[in-house]
Amino acid sequence: VATNGARRELPEENLDALVEVLDDIRAHTTRSRAEIVRSRNLSRAVVAQRVQELLDRGLVELGDAGPSTGGRAPRLLRFRRDAGHLLVADLGATSIDVAIADLGGHLLVHHQEPADIADGPEAVLGRVAELFREILAGTPRLTSELWGIGVGVPGPVEFETGRAVAPPIMPGWDGFLVGEYFSQRFGVPVWVDNDVNVMALGELRAGVARGHSNVVFVKIGTGVGAGLVVDGHLHRGAQGSAGDVGHIRVTDDPAVICRCGKTGCLEAVAGGAALARDGRAVAEAGRSALLLELVDAEGEVTAEGVAWAAGRGDPASVELIRRAGALVGDMLSTAVHFLNPSLLVIGGGVSAAGDELLASIREVVYGTSLPLATRDLAIQRSALGHRAGVVGAATMVADGLFSRDRLGLWIERGSPAQTT
Amino acid sequence: VATNGARRELPEENLDALVEVLDDIRAHTTRSRAEIVRSRNLSRAVVAQRVQELLDRGLVELGDAGPSTGGRAPRLLRFRRDAGHLLVADLGATSIDVAIADLGGHLLVHHQEPADIADGPEAVLGRVAELFREILAGTPRLTSELWGIGVGVPGPVEFETGRAVAPPIMPGWDGFLVGEYFSQRFGVPVWVDNDVNVMALGELRAGVARGHSNVVFVKIGTGVGAGLVVDGHLHRGAQGSAGDVGHIRVTDDPAVICRCGKTGCLEAVAGGAALARDGRAVAEAGRSALLLELVDAEGEVTAEGVAWAAGRGDPASVELIRRAGALVGDMLSTAVHFLNPSLLVIGGGVSAAGDELLASIREVVYGTSLPLATRDLAIQRSALGHRAGVVGAATMVADGLFSRDRLGLWIERGSPAQTT
């Protein structure tokens, strides 16, 4: 509630234009007022007023002079991505990534360590909070304020409330208010989403998907999941479970039992845990000297190990990777029929480990989809790799902070980092 | 080009509000100014001005008095759906539907006749143009002007240009400018889209999908196709081929050859043409007395005939319908994993013919999808049935006429039915 004279109300339509102008400046390294007028279809006067508002609030700064069109050259505008900073975390099934990021999604500090999501929210989030405090303390040169927190979790999330809606693989997480956990401890607004959605957002804004409007991002890590960009926006679905492709039934084989309790799921055959299991079996059966060497050297076979061995031509590993690639490719071919995207992005730890998986996915998608839908379809590896989650989480927070509702609150109350 | 003094330019932001107010009134039977203020988050003054603009232009009229809040009760607003009329056509693989509709998508006249899309665009569209003229001539009580035309075609469409991007099943249609064909002959703007998209839009605005934001509409006619509503909007994809689910590979059986030239496609097993083929084979093999009766009575077995026989308990027909339902159900289960919709709508001629198909689709989708995604998922039959295409086409035209760009042109030039 505003109690002092600083309270201002901007008419709704003015706020819309403010969001448009800021979005436009944020999306470019430098931007002239004339470019904003053209691209956003706003009047010169409206753009000039909104730019001044953003300059006054320190969100935008003047850069070099732009090209002159006769008189004095106008100075270009630049988003002040250092006006505040963000804390972000990407929780995987077996790892935690935390980072400090600026408002443009650039990472200032990045730390990764192993973790087990099945330890439950108090243990895992407690460790994340501890890491947040440590990296803040270890970065004394930060002069800006903390403006927000972003968290990706490896399961469905009710985006509006930051509540985990967890499948059986995350015992203890169902209904847990992840957002509230951090907003109470750090006193800033928190955005929470499914980890794969967050990675897709990272690729859309700062990775290989820049400029695309329809994208399917598939993560092949311990499990398999997808993030969908539809008409330029992340699609979360009615319950936040959109992109939950790991549990599509791909085989009738009753021996393929998934951690979700069903049989025949995609990730029970093509996910990282499945590849590690099958690689171990192949090594133990004496069908791969290379995988057996891995077991001797590292004590275990990981999915990354299988991908690495496939890259070195190990026939049994090539077979495993090809089978996984064909099944992921079938799923993506179906996605192409449904959604007609212009880009498929392959991410996650397993995909990063070698070229064989990408090659077999491409073979299946281009071979089985409609020519019309694949004519201009690109299939590429993630550009951000293991940073996709934290970069995407920072982008999610920046999008939230500079959304219509938040900017309205800010102008009313005088601070960007209001928790309600 | 505007050449007289009537030319007016509305500032861009004012136009946005005009579209919002009109959308809001169009979406309701009656609407008060106060309701618009609340639902659209606009100021009272802005709503009052825009309502007056719409009253002046004859798009909105005053109805009964609304509930009083103290003073004189304000009169409710009503969209004048009879301000103009529309011509709409729904082209199927084997039929043409044409209709005259009002601006609210209500049909004034509706005519259906058999046709063969493979006769090519000149023949099929020539017949549609002839039918348009006939139903206009046969409806002398029309006092309003023709404001636009809408056409659904059974293949991908480049929506912006009204150009058919046809698969091999529509010889001669590839690249044909369907929109231009009608705009040249009738002098009004034309909107063209894929028939299943148009049907999905009809269900969204006037059918069983009203109020839903995420919907998958599947048409089981001669072929199989889907229309996707994502976050309240039709999703067309990068090349307009989104929802082209009939050619998803569902079997490795090389004997299942699709009309697209590939093998194993969904519609080659579960589409109406496939059901008719299989029903005929069953009758000829003497495995169904009921289907044989149909052959004797009608000279052929249709997919509708198989569905009807299944409804009467004919075991061979039940088996065929169940197999088709299971395959369509598998596809929809995958759609649920991808998109997490709140509603699946089953439409098209085959689905209308009996309950067995819907039952088997429901069994598979509820049995194989994640519980989270199906918790609030409804699976329903099309409410509009064979009218879905023409009602949807009328909705598409109304949406186009009252879009931001069109309303801007109208205000500039003084007529809603400008062709460019």
Image: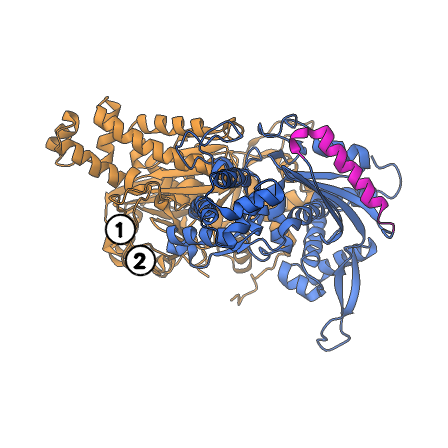
Chain colours: A orange, B blue
Residue in the foreground of this view, choosing between A11 and B177:
B177
Residue type at numbered disc 1: Ile
* CA gap, disc 1 and disc 2: 9 Å
**In the drawing, what numbered circle is on residue A173?**
2
The percent position of residue A163, horizontal first and vertical second, equals: 38, 58
A293 drawn magenta: no
> Residue at the spot x=66%, y=34% of the render?
B116
Which residue is outermost to the top?
A: A313
Image: B42 above or below A81: below
Residue in the foreground of this view, choosing between A40 and A389:
A389
Query: Image quadrant for the C terminus of chain B?
Result: top right
Residue that badge 1 annotates:
A117
Residues under numbered marks 1 and 2 in contact, where contact means CB atoms less than 8 Å apart:
yes
Mark 2 residue crowding within 10 angstroms, few (<14) / some (14–19) / many (20+): many
- Chain that bears disc 2: A
> Residue at the spot x=72%, y=34% of the render?
B179
Mark 1 residue crowding within 10 angstroms, few (<14) / some (14–19) / many (20+): many
For the record, the magenta segment spans B116-140
> Residue at the spot x=60%, y=52% of the render?
B204
